[in-house]
Every structure is written in structure tokens, then in C-alpha cells.
Image: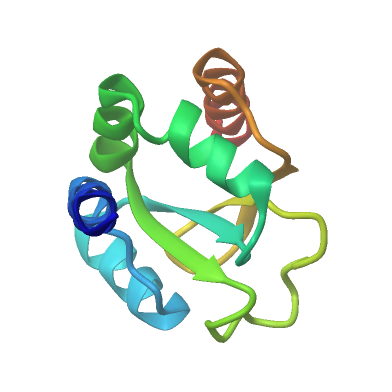
Amino acid sequence: MKHLILSLIFISSLYSYELNWINNYDTALELAKKENKDVYLFIGADNCRFCERFKDWTLSKKEVIDTLKEDYILLYLNRDHHKIPKHFVTQGVPRHYFLTGHGKIIHEDAGSREPSGFYDILDEVELKKD
């Protein structure tokens, strides 16, 4: 049991390190402006099986990670622990928001997506930017 717990801690620390999530809305916007990037806001919750599924199926894939890191500042807000601005919907997680560096919503979506479905969302975001 001890080895299982240590393995889970190690795996979760690798996951967090790989994606470099920011957990503060204002900090993410400041960094987005500085790096001339948009923001990907992922809102989740404790005990959310769909959030965990999305993390395991999609956010663990190298190609998804590389795409997100290249184009976005990554912001994760847990509705059970973090301060979330009131204009974001926090019911029905996971929720996905794509924002400009000034906080304007480019696109919003909800639900767990497999990588191909998530790429469809990213394509839609790009179309809305033009």
C-alpha cells in the first residue's frame, strides 16, 4: 500500500510539472500578456470523475501537452479550492474556457473530451480568433 501511495504521488507530481498549471486568474492574465499568448482555463472539482477522465485520457497525451504549452498559458481552477471570477460557470465540470490575455472569452465548452475531440475545440477557438 505504501508503494502505491508513493507511486501515485510521484505520478501526480510529474503530471503537474508537465503542464505547469497556474492557479490564479490574475497571474495567468499577466503572464499571457507578457508572453503574447491566450489562456486556457480548465475548471474542475474534487471527486469529479469526468475531470479525472479528461486528465487521464487527454491531458496526459504528449501531443496535447505540447500544443497547449506552445499556444496557451495554462490556468487550472478547482471550484472547491480556488477563487474563480463570478462570470465563469462552475457547475457542470469539467469546463473549458479560452481567453485573451485581457480576459475576454474566445470560446467556452464543457465536458470530458478525448484528444481528437479536444483538437476539434482548439480548431474552433482558432476560427473564432480570426
Q: Residue furthest top?
A: 116
Q: Is residue 4 left or right of residue 81?
A: left
The residue positioned 72% from the left and 39% from the top of the image is 111
Horizontal relation, residue 121 to residue 61: left or right: right
Horizontal and vertical percent for residue 27? 34, 79
Q: Is residue 106 left or right of residue 29?
A: right
Find residue 104 and report its horizontal and vertical position in percent: 60, 62
Location of residue 47 with respect to 96 vertically, above or below: below
- Describe residue 47's horizontal placement relative to residue 35 as left or right: right
Q: Name the residue at 63% across, 25% down.
A: 124
Q: Is residue 58 visible?
A: no
Q: Quadrant of the N terminus?
A: bottom left
> Which of these two is toward me, 56 or 25?
56
Q: Residue at x 49, y 57 (%)?
A: 100
The front one of 128 and 62 is: 62
Residue 88 position (above or below residue 98): below
**Is residue 72 or residue 93 the one in the foreground?**
93
Outermost residue to the front: 1
Q: Return the x and y of residue 7 as percentages of the image width and height.
A: 21, 49
What is the basis of the colouring in this image? Answer: rainbow
User: Splitting the image into 4 quarters, where does residue 91 fall?
Assistant: bottom right
**Is residue 88 at least partly visible in the picture?**
yes
Say how many tags the image has. Answer: 0
Given residues 26 and 78, the one toward you in this image is 78
| Quadrant in the picture for the C terminus | top right
